[in-house]
Image: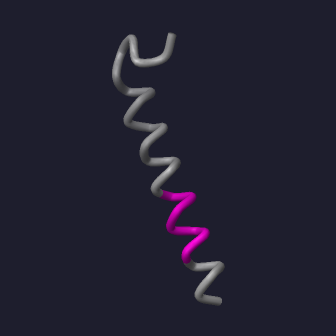
Amino acid sequence: EEYAREQIAAEEAHVADIGKMLRKPGSIT
């Protein structure tokens, strides 16, 4: 269960990072 929780947290952080990048114009070429 600990492992699964860590995986979910890491995935959420990853998604948040992608969301930030997508909101910045010109960040993705």
Q: Nearer the viewer, residue 23 or 13?
A: 13
Q: Is residue 11 magenta?
A: yes
**Which residue is pictured at 40% across the width and 18% down the height?**
27
Q: Is residue 4 above or below residue 15?
A: below
Q: Residue furthest left?
A: 24
At x 61%, y 69%, the residue is 7
What's the image's color scheme?
one colour
Q: Quadrant of residue 22?
A: top left
In the rendered image, the quadrant that contains the N terminus is bottom right
Q: Residue furthest bottom?
A: 1
Q: Is residue 1 above or below residue 22?
A: below
Q: Which residues are magenta?
A: 6-12
Q: Position of residue 3 (x, y in %)?
A: 63, 81
User: Does the magenta run of residues contain 9?
Assistant: yes
Q: How many marks?
A: 0
Q: Position of residue 19 (x, y in %)?
A: 44, 38
- Left or right of 8? Residue 18 is left
Give percent across and percent down for residue 29.
51, 10
Q: Main secondary structure of the magenta part?
A: helix
Residue drawn where x is 57% and y is 58% of the image = 11
Instruction: Reply above or below: 8 against 2.
Output: above
Q: Is residue 15 left or right of residue 3?
A: left
Q: Residue at x 37, y 27 (%)?
A: 23
